Amino acid sequence: MANVGMVGLDWQERVNWDRLRKHRLNRARERMKAHGLGAMLCMYDENVRYITGTLTPGWNRLKPGLRYCLLCGDDAPVLFEQGDIGLHIQKHSPWIPKDHVRYSYAWIKGAAGPASLQQVTKFTNAIVQEMKKAGVDGQKLGVDFVDINMIQIFKDSKIDWADGMTPMMEARAIKNEDEQECMRQVGAIGDAAHWEFMKFLKPGLTENQLTAHIMEFLYNIPGMEDVEDVFVSSGLISWPNWRIFSDRII
């Protein structure tokens, strides 16, 4: 493809988002079955995004399990989303069946003690229910994240669980033509950011000012949804690179 155009056109094939979503879902399902799993529970947002093709607010990506998805056999993914965000998924992501969008039961950030166990129990009961609906109950469940509460409740619920991160990493390792084109676009944006940084840089500015400028530059690019971080380390902290920034004057 190697076009690096970002806008969809009627006269030229660029990134085919429907093909990309289907490729990712098929890859995840293929690797799930290859590992002998009847279902796969994903709690890390990068895996949820990969399987469902859905976007959630930044705060919802901070901890695994604030939202999560379940892939059972040949059934469509079930998405457990935070609160009423699921209503937007139903409206804007038609490739996820509306009756496959659920409320999530989260405990990773903010619940402790009895409240945590209560949430994990609800969480586990919902997973078991969905596996029964899909006819894969009793089969092995792959999980990409686990904590001490899940281990106990899964044991009580007789869930046979196994590593689900390995099949997901195997799935994501193979990129189709659309993902490769997206990576070229990201590379071009990175080049542009470094060039803009060189033009803007001058003595007397602070690392904070440089960081703010590049953040603004990146978020002004159409379609930009998330800038994970910007590192501006100068002078004495540039090597070994601390990968932070401060009010240090350059």
Image (cartoon, rainbow, N blue to C red):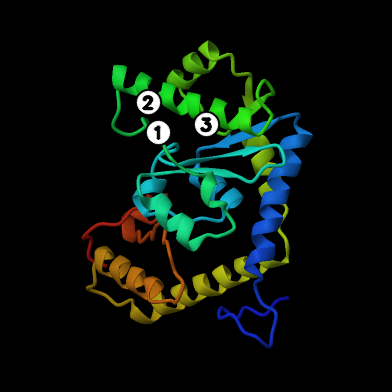
The alpha-carbon separation of the residues under discs 3 and 1 comes to: 15 Å
Which amino acid type is shown beneath numbered disc 1?
A: Tyr
- Percent x, y of residue 81: 43, 45
- Percent x, y of residue 191: 52, 74
Res. 192 mark: none
Label 3 or label 1, whichever lies nearer to me, is 1
Residue 197 visible in rendering: yes
Which amino acid type is shown beneath numbered disc 2?
A: Gln
Quarter location, residue 20: bottom right
At x 48%, y 56%, the residue is 90
At x 68%, y 45%, the residue is 28
Res. 145 mark: 3
Q: Within 10 Å of the Cα at label 2, are there few (<14), some (14-19), or many (20+) other Cα atoms?
A: some
Q: Is 225 left or right of 186, judged from the image as shown?
A: left
Residue 113 visible in rendering: no
- Percent x, y of residue 195: 46, 78
Res. 119 mark: 2
Which amino acid type is shown beneath numbered disc 3?
A: Phe
- 245, 77: nearer the viewer: 77
Quick check: marks 1 and 2 in contact, CB under 8 Å?
Answer: yes
